[in-house]
Image: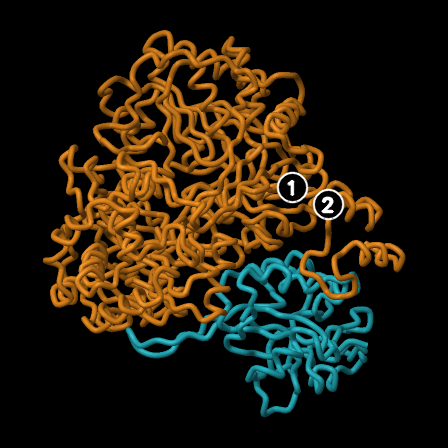
Amino acid sequence: MPRYAMVIDQSRCIGCMACVVACKRENDVPPEVYRTRVLEIVQGNFPDLTTEMRSELCNHCDHAPCVTICPTGASHYEEDGTVQVDIDKCVGCKACIAACPYNVRYINEEHGYVDKCSFCQHRLKEGKKPACVATCVGGSRIFGDLDDPKSEVSVILRKTSHRVLKKSIGTRPNVYYINQYPKKA
Amino acid sequence: MAFSRRSFLKYAAMSAGGAALADTPFISAEARAKAEGGNVKYVPTSCEMCFWKCGAVAKVVDGKVVKLEGNPFHPQSRGKLCARGQGGIGQLYDEDRLKHPMIIDGPRGAGKYREASWDEALTYVAKKLKAIAAKHGPESIGMMSHGSPGDYFTNVLKAMGSHNIAFPSFAQCKGIRDEAWLLTYGHKPGSSCEQVDLENSRVIVLIGTHLGENMHNSQNQEFAEAIGRGAKIICVDPRYSTAASKAAFWLPIKPGTDTALLLTWINIIISENWYDKEYVEKYTEGFEQVKEAVKQYTPEWAAQETELPMRQIVESVRELSRYAPNVVVHPGRHYSWYGNDTQRARAVAILNALLGTWGRKGGMWLPPKANFAKFNDDIPAYPPASKPPLIKGDFPFAGGEGVTQVLRDATITGKPYPIKAWFVAGTNLMKTLPDQRLTRKAIDNLDFFVAVDLFPTETVMLADVILPECTYLERHDGLFKIKTREAGVAIRQPAVEPMYDSKPAWWIGSELCKKLGLNEYAVKGNGMDAWEGRMRRQAKAWGIDYDKLAKHTGYVTIPGSERPYITADNQPVFNTFSEKIELYSEDLEEKGFDPVPQYEEIEHPEKGMYRLIYGRSPVHTFSRTINTQWLWELEKENEVWLNKKEAVRLGVKNGEYVRLENQDGVRSNKIKTKVTERIRHDCVYMVHGFGHNAPRMKRANGSGADDQKLITKYIEDPITGGTGMRVNFVKIIKEA
């Protein structure tokens, strides 16, 4: 089985929001909620400023607090390394929303279940990359299989220093952040 | 939709590489639909959420567009779409669209209309236009337009005998730049897109150009690619834009002094011998005159004028020169800033020439080599213009696209002759032209005003007859010539049938020709597929396989057209009088302008006033997309960026609503303040296009503030007629 992961090259993100709208449409995400977002975090004083462009989404953690806390087993691990929500089992108790340290889950108000990024599992099954990756104008989002040592994500993580969000809490995310990976030599 | 294993296998076999996940795993739109089965259809077409004309593929299920993707074959999209392109479905299914032809039923501006059939509306329009043409001459009918509908109504007007047609893309945008480059290189710096070889650039200079926020798909893909490869960005902008955040050098220049910096850079490059001597010798004229003319622009002087550290001025240009010619000073796009903008564009053009970028890898690629056979579908020649067109005003280098405000002025003054009717298609003039008071005055002066549009904008709702165009996802247009590094042809075709009683602009124009008794100018054939018949004939004339285009790829390349770099057997052709790059312009000199750009100081705001600058958001296209569901949701209103120290001084908090009042006492809607370190103290910034005054556009109406309302002052560039619009000063008024 594959073990899916995403690598985000923050240097290449130009904040265009194509990923956000692609996801919204691909997954019929309800109004005013999102499965992914792009933050432009600026620090310093004029004119000495620095920026971090940070795309955030479900980290598909190996140790996912949302799975641990879910009383019904709706939030669960799948064999492909992703964390998914079985909406038929979800009772909408929102425990997972409270437990998630990354604030990437929302309640589907119309149907009452919790939802979040699925790494576009339906597209993966069709041999396609997640919608956000496919349309990423900057080529900032890179997706692949960590069990395949030749996959782009495996190569990048071997060769490039990387980090995950809130590493110290031990969730072991599968979304990695890098700064400038030269794709072409 | 269920996806069977069998269809998956077929699908996987089709996609290159098979098992590997692909960005856009398909070869042909038709084959892809067949593989998926069911009621799925993939329609390759061209996006019109902005004017970059990306190739898009619409996924249609049971007659509904459910997804839009970038066409991998199309060089402007390369398999990707931006946020707006993805959001195009929102435009198609926007419930606020114009649905039926409407005829005014009350005074102008009262918003009272009655629905009419197409036959009634077009008969009425034809009768009115004929009467005006008979009384005042056909030249008294003027047109302004943006985007693809323009072609069809240009045909109508020219057939009637009027050439008074103007596009805001000239005087309110990039026409100024184009003319400056034509004077220098004999070429515009690009037609479908700027000829910048960003993906191979070592250093990219952006003068106010805010890539990332100014979202043109392929150009931004290349910009990110350049950053990923470690190219150095030099960003000149009073605001710390997203592009500035990627820059090795951010030069927070004092607004209005860009030409001082550019001329100083030119001086440094020449005096330090950093220019490309061989290139300058071989391809340019007038080097010695430039050298003399820029001597006065020293780094010390520039530091004072631009309020940039001298070290930064010198170090950035040293870096730029070091990697020349694999560098580019981006020609920019929206150029109507200060009223002396042609000379700024000339300075950029000259700087590029001295660095030898034209025709060099990482610089500017040479235009593709392709000859398209002439095709006009045997439409007869137009009658001569009834009177010489007035649309160039007194501007010696106004381009063929015309100068919009000249047409507006003539409508108000009746000079040099009266303009009595307007035909406005696809442009919201109230938000496009500076000084809305004059636009309104001109409209009030009209005997007749027809608007063709998708939405009931503030301009449309002043028209006497409103004709609802269908969206780009519901119509044929083109064929389009696409000129990137290669030449190619792209198609626009409907993914679904037009909704409501909306119609394609080609049909509206063609039917109007018939109503005017100008049948020979109408599209040949009858019915809704007449234009497609024309497209097929055009494809044949051009030697293009129409079916391949329509069913499979949406875009085809003209083989052998790509010759981007100078080689021994691929020499650049400059369509100037000297057949060289004219650093010194005799054309300008002859008309009494500086043959080499000279710095002109402009007026700066007094303490307590801020220069109003404006720009783009990556999720909106001017005022056109504000009402579009997902795009509106992402950015519902604009903010005014205010320097933090100034905010503290004024006691304005981040997120607080304020109003802006300009030098003429005109006040904006309320607007949220973004208190930030990301902008200089002497200017404020907002995204253009918000603050609609259009009650029938429910989401957009009243959201944010309209920069154009505050642009009551504008300075016309004497060379091209471009309207410098960054010359307005505002103060911040706290809400009581």
Disc nearer the start of the sequence (2/1):
2
Residue drawn at 84 percent across, 58 percent down? B8
Q: Which percent across, then down, holds residue B309?
A: 20, 72
The residue marked by circle 1 belongs to what chain?
Answer: B
Q: Are marks 2 and 1 on the same chain?
A: yes
Name the side, left or right, on which B518 lies relative to B239. right
In the figure, the orange chain has which letter? B
- Do tag 2 and tag 1 residues touch (Cβ < 8 Å)? yes
**Quarter where residue B732 is shown:** bottom left
Q: Which percent across, then down, holds residue B371?
A: 51, 32
Q: Which percent across, then down, holds residue B379?
A: 52, 15
Q: Quadrant of the N terminus of chain B?
A: bottom right
The residue marked by circle 2 belongs to what chain?
Answer: B
Residue drawn at 33 percent across, 38 percent down? B186
Q: Dot 2 lies on which element?
A: helix
Residue B97 appears in the picture as rendered: yes
Colour style of the rendered protein structure: by chain
Residue drawn at 37 percent across, 60 percent down? B327
Kind of residue sitting beneath label 2: Ala
Kind of residue sitting beneath label 1: Gly
Residue drawn at 14 percent across, 55 percent down? B294
Q: Which mark is residue B643?
A: none
Q: Which mark is residue B29?
A: 2
Disc 1 target residue: B554
User: How many other residues sit within 10 Å of disc 1, few (<14), some (14-19) or many (≥20)?
Assistant: many
